[in-house]
Image (cartoon, rainbow, N blue to C red):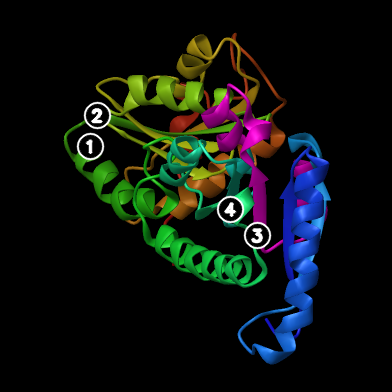
Amino acid sequence: MADKPLKALLITGDLDTIALLEEAFAEIEEVRYSRGWIPRCELVPVDRLEEATEALAAEPFDVILLDASLLDGRVLETFARLRAAARELPVIVLAEPGEEAQALSLLRRGAQDYLLKPEIDCLPLARTLRAAVERQRLSNALESLALLDELTGLLTAAGLAQFAERHARLALAAGRAVQLLVVELERENEIGDLLRAAEVLTELFSETGLVARTAPARLVALAVSEQPIDPARLAAERLTAVAFRAAAVAWPPDPGACLEDVLDACEQLLCENEPGRAGPLTHALALDDRPRRHLQPRG
């Protein structure tokens, strides 16, 4: 951290807040040579959340400073969109006196800390930045091991990997049909689409199967049923206002089949498919094609 600056993205439309943070960062630069724990810091201000999303996609940052006044009435939804765009980065909320309740609400939603604007000063700000970055690193490490997705409540990729193969083998042994469905949302940062798709897949498949969020805009369902179904078409009938691509393959009855192989088959189909909405999904695996599409176990 001593070699490269700690890069902070400041999201605020208030010129006074920009001036306040620029002054604090300048003071940090003045004292950091006498304080070995203070990193070199760089501030990049933007005045709208849309610009913040573009900046996050264009260059790397270490921390986000978010002015709570930008969130207006849709606080949780707007904050969720920001977190979806930079889930691995710590967010520090900048609040006015009297906005502590809102700031604490955002802490419960994943923000690392908050600062009251009148109390912002050089050394406290430097400590807050450093601590937020370190806590987020630990949080990211723990999240990679977590089994449940914080936003949707679905399994994570790690959770799916832990349970899918055993679940599929038990279902096949009981004479059930097992298919794997992958749904890729077209609007990656649209939280409403994600939550709607998660709700639909949970209603359709979680009672006997498994549902996971394996990437920011990707959901995977292990669909278990008494008779073969077309899970992609079934999902499409309920996702009438969500833009997505989908692919489904049958889980091979061979005990050597693994989750990675079945996901690879779904990925190949997904790459061939065009974005779709409601209606028949001709790109879903045809049921009478299942015997020819079984995967060979790895050697």
Q: Which mark is residue 171?
A: 1
Q: CA distance from mark 3 to mark 1?
A: 45 Å
Residue drawn where x is 62% and y is 65% of the image: 125
Q: Which residues are magenta?
A: 52-81
Label 3 CA crowd tier, 10 Å (few <14, some 14–19, many 20+): many
Label 2 CA crowd tier, 10 Å (few <14, some 14–19, many 20+): few
For disc 3, the marked residue is 63
Viewer-nearest of labels 2 and 1? 2
Tag 4 and tag 1, C-beta contact below 8 Å = no
When asked about the image quadrant of residue 168, the answer is top left
Say which of 269 and 157 sits in front: 157
Q: Is residue 61 magenta?
A: yes
Q: Identity of the amino acid at label 4? A: Ile
Residue drawn where x is 45% and y is 66% of the image: 141
For disc 2, the marked residue is 208
Residue 188 seen in this snapshot: no
Q: Identity of the amino acid at label 3? A: Val
Tag 2 and tag 1, C-beta contact below 8 Å = yes
Q: CA distance from mark 2 to mark 1?
A: 9 Å
Viewer-nearest of labels 4 and 3? 4
Tell whether 268 sits left or right of 24: left
Tag 4 and tag 3, C-beta contact below 8 Å = yes
